[in-house]
Amino acid sequence: MGKIRVGKPDVKIDAPTHVKGIHQGNTGPYDKQPGHHQDGTADARRSTGIYPKRHNPILKIMPNLPPG
Amino acid sequence: MTVTERASAGTKPPQIVEMSWDPITRIIGNLGIYTKIDFANQQVTECHSTSSLFRGYSVFMRGKDPRDAGFITSRICGICGDNHTTCSVYAQNMAYGIDNPPLAEHIINLGEAAEYMFDHTIFQDNLVFVDFCEAMVKQTNPSVLARAEKTQAPSAEIHGYRTIADIMRAYNPFEGEVYKQALKVSRTTREMFCTMEGRHVHPSTVYPGGVGTMPEPTTFTDYLTRLLSILDFVKQSVAMNDDVFDFFYEALPGYEEVGRRRILLGCWGAYQDPTACDYRYEHMTDWGRAMKVTPGIIVDGQQITTDLVDINLGIRILLGSSYYDDWVNEDPFVTHDPLGNPVDIRHPWNQTTFPVPQKRNFDGNYSWVMSPRWFDKRTGDHLALDTGGGPLARLWSTALAGLVDTEYVKSTGSSVLISLPRSEKLPEMTLEWKIPKWSNALERNRARTYFVAYSAALAVHFLDVALDLIRGGDIKVFNNFSVPDEAVGCGFHEAVRGVLSHHLVIRDGKIANYHPYPPTPWNGSPRDSYGTPGPYEDAVQDMPIFEENGPDNFKGVDIMRAVRSFDPCLPCGVHMHLGQGRVLKKLHSPMLGASHG
C-alpha cells in the first residue's frame, strides 16, 4: 500500500482461499449429482428420479437431451 | 506527440472563462471535466479530466485464490461486470492450461452479445440521446430545432417518424416513445443474458473451464424468441441514428470537429471461436485473429497490427499526473512472456500499485486514473489510444482486417455487412457500417447502434452453431482443471465501452499480481510523463463550440456530447475510498469452517 498508513487487517488477505469442507469446484461432484457423466454427457436421471431409464432415448445413436 | 492538431478557430481577442463539470451526470462514477472556454472565438482552449475515486482492486487481489478472481473483479462495474468475469476466465484458462468446451464458449458468447445489446441500448437511447432530444436542442440550439421541424427524415418508411424533429421528440426523456421502448428492450436483453450467464450483471454460472448453465434446447430457443422480438427496434434505431447524425452534420457545418481526435483506436477482440481457441499464449496470434470481433490497433486509418501478442507486449502503464508512486525499482514479476519476448517493467504483469493520496493540482498530479499507453515500436511513440466508446474501434478494426466471414456478418476490408433476419414488422435487412472519415463524437455514437445490430446478427450465428452441437448430443459445458503453483495468464476481451485486459501472475497457488485494465483508464487518462494528454482531454481541447447560449446560461452540451460519446464509466477507470472514514457498523459473517474471524 505504499506509504499509506493502514490498520491491522481483520482477516488474512487470502481468507476464503479454501475452506475445509467446501467443494473446490475444479472438478464435477459426479458422485453427488446422479445423471451427470464424467465425459460431459447426461441422462434422464439428471432431470428425474422417477423411472428415469424410461425417459432415455430408445436408440443409442440418439442424443440424450434431458430437460432441466 | 500523439495529440490531435486542429486549425485555429478565430482571431478575435480571447474572452476566456473557466467552466467545470464535476461530477458529470448520466455516466457511472466520478468524472470531472475542467475546461477553459474562449467565448469570443467559440472554442475550448484547455481541458483536464480528473477522477476522485480510488478503488484498489490490484492492491487487494494479491494473495487471494485465483479461482475467485472472476467473481471479485466482476464487482468492478455494476453494468459490465460480466465482461470482467469473462475476461478473468480467459486469463485463468491460460494460466491453468485449459479451455472451455465449444458449447460453453458459445453460451458465453451469447451472454456477452446480450450484454452488448443491453448496455449499448440503455446508454444510447436513455442517456446519450438526452443530449440530442428536442427538449435539449430547444434550449441550446433553437435554430437547429426550427430546421429539424422542416427536414424530412430520409428513412421515415422504416422508423415511421416524418421529420427529424419528430425523432428528436421521441428521444425526450421519460416521455418520448424511443426512450420508453428502449427501457423495455433493455429488460428483454437482460433476460437473454440471464438465460445464458445466470444473473445480470455479476454472472453466477461463468467459471474457468466452462459454464454451469444447463444446456437444454429450450435455453437457446428462449433466447432466440427474445432476440427476434427486439429486432424491429434494432433495425429502426439504426435508421433513426443515421437520420439524426447526418442531419447534425448538415445543420451545423463543422460539427465533425466536436470530439474529434486523431484516429488512434484500440480493440482487444471479442467472441472467441472455440474451433481455433485453445487459450495457449503460444497460439494467441492465431486464435486472436479468429475472434468474431477482430483485435487491432488503428493509427491514422491504418491497421498496424491484429496480433494479440504484439498488442500485449506493447501495453505500458505510465504515470505523470496520477496519485501514485512509481514501481520501477520493484522486482519484476514476469521478465519474459511464454514465447521468450522481454516484458517491460511498465507492463501490467509487472505493475505494483502504490497509492499516494494528495491534493489536486492541475499543474502536477490531478487524477486517480493512470495513463495506459501503447508503445509503437515503429516510431517509439507511446500512443494514447482510445476505444471510440467501444463500438467504433471494434467495427473499424473488424472492417479493416477483413477476417470475419459468417452468414450473418461479413467484413469487407472497408465496411462491415450485417444481415438481420425478418422480424415482426420489418423484412430481412442488410445494414452496412462504413468506415467513417473521422473519429468524432457523432461517429462514436453512430457506431454504437450498428454494433447492437452486429451483436444481434452474431447471436443468431452462435445460436445456429450451439443448436447444431446440441442436436449432435454434445452438451459438455465444463472441463476439469487444477490450479498450478506458478503460472501467468492474460485475457483480452471487449468490455461494452472498449478494450479490456486482465493480467494475472500466480505464485504458490495464490495471486501474486492481478491487473485489470478496462476501457476508461485508456479514455479518461490524464497527461502522461511525456506530457501527452489523455483521449477525453485531447478530444475536447481546441474543440469548437456550437451552442448558441453565452457564458451566463451555458450548458456545455457540445462538450458533454464529446465526453459522453466515449461512454465514460469511471468505476472501472480507477481501481476503496481512503480518508478519515467513520466505521458505521462492523459485521462478522459466520461461515462453514470459519477459522479466520
Image (cartoon, rainbow, N blue to C red):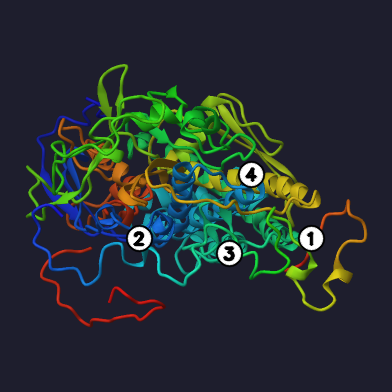
Q: Secondary structure at mark 4?
A: helix
Instruction: Give the label on residue B458, or none.
Output: 4
The label on residue B26 is 2
Q: Residue under circle 3?
A: B194
Q: Amino acid at mark 1?
A: Leu
Looking at the image, which residue is at 42% across and 44% down?
Answer: B498
> Going 56% across and 43% down the picture, which residue do you hit?
B271
Question: Could you say which is closer to the camera, residue A7 or residue B25?
Answer: A7
Q: Which residue is mark 1?
A: A65
Q: Is the residue under label 3 in contact with that under label 2 (CB below 8 Å)?
A: no
Please tell me which residue lies in front, B334 or B110: B334
Tag 1 and tag 2 share a subunit: no
**Is residue B525 toward the left or the right of residue B204 in the image?**
left
Could you give the CA–CA distance between mark 3 and mark 1, rounded to whole angstroms?
21 Å
For marks 2 and 4, the one nearer the N-term is 2
- Sequence-wise, which precedes: disc 3 or disc 4? 3
* Residue B374 position within the rendered picture, expressed as x and y whole percent measured from the top left: 31, 31
Chain at numbered mark 3? B
Q: Secondary structure at mark 1?
A: loop
Quadrant of image for the C terminus of chain B: bottom left
Quadrant (top left, top right, bottom left, bottom right) of the N terminus of chain B:
top left
User: Marks 1 and 4, Cα distance to the nearest angstrom?
Assistant: 25 Å
Disc 3 marks a residue whose amino acid type is Cys
Work out how far the residue at label 2 is from the one at label 3, CA to CA, in angstroms. Answer: 25 Å
Report the residue at 19% width, 31% height from top: B10
Give the amino acid type for the residue marked by disc 4 in the picture.
Leu
What's the amino acid at mark 2? Arg
